[in-house]
């Protein structure tokens, strides 16, 4: 069945994108000063308060949800593919735990991560270093925790906020990371804040070894008690100059469910 993004949504998402990222590829002023700027702190703290404050996120112990990746033809808005992943998370004193399950065609893949040990299976058979799904486990596990933890994680130790100034009529905050923070020390992030709005209007990130910026916006905000999370992360083609090519949707969130013993252990041989 052919699905399309609603035309009104497309119009809203594409406004100002062609000019938003001008100059992103040039040397950035955000790394010139290692001290967090008070204005950058203020913008991020205001965002945190708007989504329930640190207390709301601190109450999250476990979660289960479906993370569906939708891929679109950016010129027509036609849905080409939708792939769900089933994510289970836990925050513990020992670190963040993750279990991710998905189907790829006829293959059932399970990835688990306890902050140190990667475990992955395909159709119940263990994978090893060199297998794509094993190699990606640590990254995708950190990724699902990171997005569920925004904006709170922007105030973690080793995360440096820098106020760049006004850009395209919005205030621009840059983010850099201290040594050993995250999987990639050299990742860079940008957040654009519009006057009168607490959430960023747009954001962009570039991974350490990449020359390209990923440009996206937050849509479809959802609430679970005092905790507010993003229902749809909308990505744009050509560093923001093209149409929508990907949407990641978070749905069916279970907040603090009781998890079966062994959820994050070595994936078993059974399939759902």
Image (spheres, grey):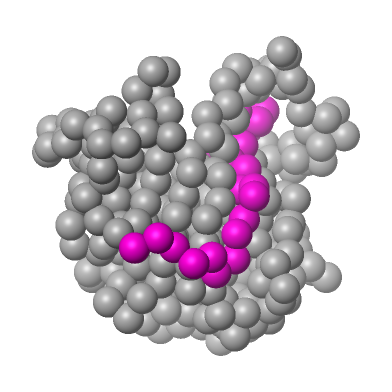
Whether residue 207 can be seen here: no
Residue 61 as seen in the image, left or right of residue 139:
right
x and y percent of residue 245 in the render? 60, 28
Whether residue 94 can be seen here: yes
Point out the stretch of residues depicted in magenta: 238-261
199 vs 143: above or below: below
Residue 201 as seen in the image, left or right of residue 159:
right
Q: Nearer the viewer, residue 147 or 104?
A: 104
Residue 251 as seen in the image, left or right of residue 127:
right
Residue shown at 41%/72% (left/top)?
91
x and y percent of residue 177 in the render? 34, 68
Residue 210, quarter of the rendered image: top left
x and y percent of residue 130 in the render? 13, 33
Q: Is residue 194 magenta?
A: no
Residue shown at 53%/81% (left/top)?
58
State the quadrant of the N terminus.
Answer: top right
Q: Nearer the viewer, residue 188 or 123?
A: 123
121 vs 151: above or below: above
- The number of numbered badges drawn on the structure is 0
Q: Nearer the viewer, residue 189 or 72?
A: 72
Residue reaching furthest top? 1
x and y percent of residue 140 in the render? 36, 47
Residue shown at 49%/67% (left/top)?
258
Residue reaching furthest right? 8
State the quadrant of the C terminus.
Answer: top left
Q: Is residue 239 magenta?
A: yes
Residue shown at 62%/55% (left/top)?
253
59 vs 124: above or below: below
């Amino acid at each position: 069945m052919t699905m399309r993004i609603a035309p009104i949504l497309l119009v809203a998402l594409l406004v100002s994108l062609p000019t938003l990222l001008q100059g992103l590829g040039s040397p950035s002023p955000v790394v010139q000063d290692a001290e967090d700027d008070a204005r950058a702190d203020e913008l991020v703290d205001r965002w945190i308060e708007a989504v329930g404050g640190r207390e709301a996120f601190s109450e999250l112990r476990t979660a289960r949800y479906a993370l569906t990746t939708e891929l679109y033809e950016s010129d027509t808005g036609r849905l080409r593919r939708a792939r769900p992943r089933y994510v289970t998370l836990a925050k513990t004193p020992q670190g963040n735990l993750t279990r991710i399950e998905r189907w790829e065609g006829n293959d059932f893949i399970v990835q688990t991560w306890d902050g140190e040990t990667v475990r992955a299976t395909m159709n119940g058979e263990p994978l090893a270093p060199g297998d794509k799904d094993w190699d990606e486990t640590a990254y995708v596990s950190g990724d699902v925790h990171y997005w569920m933890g925004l904006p709170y994680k922007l105030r973690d130790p080793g995360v440096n906020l820098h106020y760049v100034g006004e850009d395209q009529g919005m205030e621009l905050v840059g983010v850099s990371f201290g040594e050993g923070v995250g999987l990639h020390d050299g990742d860079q992030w940008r957040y654009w804040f519009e006057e009168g709005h607490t959430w960023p209007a747009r954001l962009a990130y570039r991974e350490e070894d990449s020359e390209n910026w990923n440009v996206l916006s937050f849509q479809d905000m959802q609430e679970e008690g005092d905790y507010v999370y993003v229902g749809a992360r909308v990505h744009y083609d050509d560093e923001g100059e093209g149409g929508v090519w990907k949407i990641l949707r978070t749905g069916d969130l279970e907040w603090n469910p009781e998890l079966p013993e062994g959820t994050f252990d070595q994936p078993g041989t059974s399939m759902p």
